[in-house]
Image: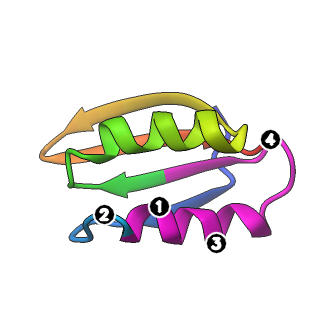
Amino acid sequence: MKIDETLDAVGLYCPAPIVLTTDKMRKLKSRDVLEILADDPEVLTDFPAWCKITGHRFLKVEKGNGIFRLYLEKA
């Protein structure tokens, strides 16, 4: 998978990761993939719900070393 941008949200808690992602997605082109790095377990429920509301596509999540890597595709 080609990653177009990465957003480091490690150490941030809700709603900061969503706010930063919203900002970053505005700057991406349709079908670009955004990788989000986070350590707040709430992102596992927040981002799938956010994608459903915004129309962006939640691709997958990887977990390792206390960091979640989430991959979203811009609508």
Horizontal side, residue 17 vs residue 25: left or right: left
Boundaries of the magenta span = 16-35
> In the rendered image of this protein, does residue 36 appear above or below residue 15?
above
Amino acid marked by disc 2: Cys
What is the secondary structure assignment of the residue under circle 3? Answer: helix
Question: Left or right: 40 with respect to 17?
Answer: left
Viewer-side label of 3, 2: 2
Which residue in the structure is indicated by mark 2?
A: 14
Single out the mark in the foreground, 2 or 4: 2
Q: Which residue is mark 3?
A: 23
Number of labels in the image equals: 4
Q: Point out which mark residue 75 bears.
A: 4
Q: Do labels 3 and 2 touch, CB within 8 Å?
A: no
Q: Which residue is mark 1?
A: 18
Q: Amino acid at mark 4?
A: Ala
Q: Secondary structure at mark 1?
A: helix
